Amino acid sequence: MKVTVGNEPAPIELIVTNATIATASDVVANQDIAISGGKIVLLGQNLPALFPHAATLDAQGGYVLPGGIDSHVHLAQDDFPTGDNWESGTRSAIAGGTTTVLAFASQNRADESVFPVVEEYHRRANDVTYCDYGFHLILSNPTANILANELPIIVRDGITSVKVYMTYQPLRLRDRQILEVMESTRRLGMTTMVHAENTEMIEWMTEKLHARGRTEPYGHALSRPPLAEDEATYRVIALSELADVPILIVHMSSKKAAEHVRNAQTRLLPIHGETCPQYLFFTSDRLKGEGFEGAKCVCSPALRESPLDLQGMWDGLANGTFTTFSSDHAPTKFDHPMGKKAGTETFTKIPNGMPGVETRLPSLFSGGVLTGRLSVQKFVELTSSNPAKLYGLHTKGTIAPGYDADLTIWYPTSEQAAQSGNGVNTMESFHLVNEMLHHDIDHTPFEGMEFKNWPRYTILRGQVVWDRDAGGLVGHKGCGQFVKRGRSTLSKPREVFVNELDLYN
């Protein structure tokens, strides 16, 4: 049997054997995956007999999943001066089973054009990444010229998503500006992401807290109550409905806000939600750590007080309210004068954000799949397949011939090991310490947490880049590629809009 590309025989470079393949729809055991030219070319059984010269990698019956897609990370941004750059952030991603990240090219308020912004972020990422990557464009100054003339070119260049903020004064847009952005993104078929918090509520609460001397890290949680997220979520859904444009509300933390999304979905509105690991595992008590330790867990939206909010996030993952599960990896160092300790005077000066790109998949796998809270199919849907569809990554997100050979291979569970027989290596559970991670940050919120599984291998376009049993990172800096994205296949306006411009040819 020969596999051909055009008229030429294509060598099979790698065969993953004894795989339990899981996609968003199916789980199939005892499968082999043949890879050629960085693509999956064949699925079946006993493939090494057909291609005896190919290298093989034995999954030993463990789950083989599509490589993780983390569609919400912050790397090498000017407002995170002590955070991860593209090298350290993507190195950490690979070590946690993520093969593609989508990070942010952030426009400053004074920028009259977004072209220099995109060029600069290309420069920062070029030739230093360990995994594939793309950009979202943060719009803080959406001028008429940018919306009418520059966004179409940005889309043609493969950046097909924007993010807008309803809070933070340097980034916040008024409702009218958001509507103008929505009108343009609808016309262009771009995915619109929204950070939904009511900035007036937050500023009022902050003033009251300062007047009472509540300046410690826990004041951050008090200043950003769930109500601020709930109101902004309801409001941006109304704006979306008026403009008839799909939106994704990012890093949701509130049970009530998630109910707004769920209610909109039952009315068949194209509203999507995203949540993150910190909103599944941690409450605002984390901000009450001894001394200034609580600053490590300052993020926005804030960690919530009630366990009911945490359960609401788990429920939203299971019932489809949330389309994606991302890390919102936005870390800063703790023990650094420009890091978390810059906020010793008041919580408003503590940089927002937490690390999580490496722990995103293992935390959900251990806390969700292995506990029975989520099926492995739902895990794949949330962490890979849906992000690929939502953001136009048309060659990623599933395991099928023609797709990129991006794979995450997990250790066999005890049940899988029993079925596979002798000689199968399961993973002993362990308690995480920050020194085990590959980011450039001096802390992790998951310090001390027990993990019962971790990616054993990460494969990027057919190349093994992470081998946990053989020293860990085996990929090289610069092996990642920029991925030009197309139109979302997951979300579209209710009323189909036929655009006179063919933006993707």
Image: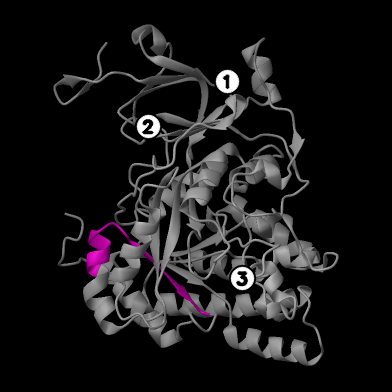
Which residue sits at x=39%, y=7%?
49
Distance CA(mark 1)–CA(mark 3) = 40 Å
Using the image as rendered, state which of residue 360 and residue 32 is in the foreground.
360
Query: Where is mark 3, residue-wise?
Result: 257
Residue type at numbered disc 1: Gly
For image coordinates 75% across by 49% down, the residue present is 447
Q: Mark 1 points at which residue?
A: 61
The quarter holding residue 39 reads top left
Q: Residue 140 in the image: x percent, y percent?
A: 42, 78
Q: What residue type is labelled 3?
A: Ala
Is residue 151 left or right of 76 when viewed as pictured?
left
CB within 8 Å, label 3 to label 2: no
Magenta stretch encompasses residue 159: yes
Q: Say left or right for 444 vs 495.
A: right
Give the magenta-colored segment's residue range.
152-166
Residue 449 position within the rendered picture, expressed as x and y whole percent measured from the top left: 76, 45
The quadrant of the picture occupied by the N terminus is top left
Query: Residue 176 at x, y = what percent?
Result: 40, 87
Counting residues from the start of the chain, the first of labels 1 and 3 encountered is 1
Q: Distance between the residues labelled 3 and 2?
A: 36 Å
Query: Callout 1 environment at 10 Å: few (<14), some (14 to 19), or many (20+)?
Result: many
Residue at position x 59%, y 80% in the image: 231
What SS does tag 2 mark?
A: loop
Q: Do the residues labelled 1 and 2 touch (CB within 8 Å)?
A: no
Q: Mark 2 points at which residue?
A: 400
- Is tag 1's residue or tag 2's residue first in the polypeptide sequence? 1
In the image, is residue 197 above or below residue 467? below
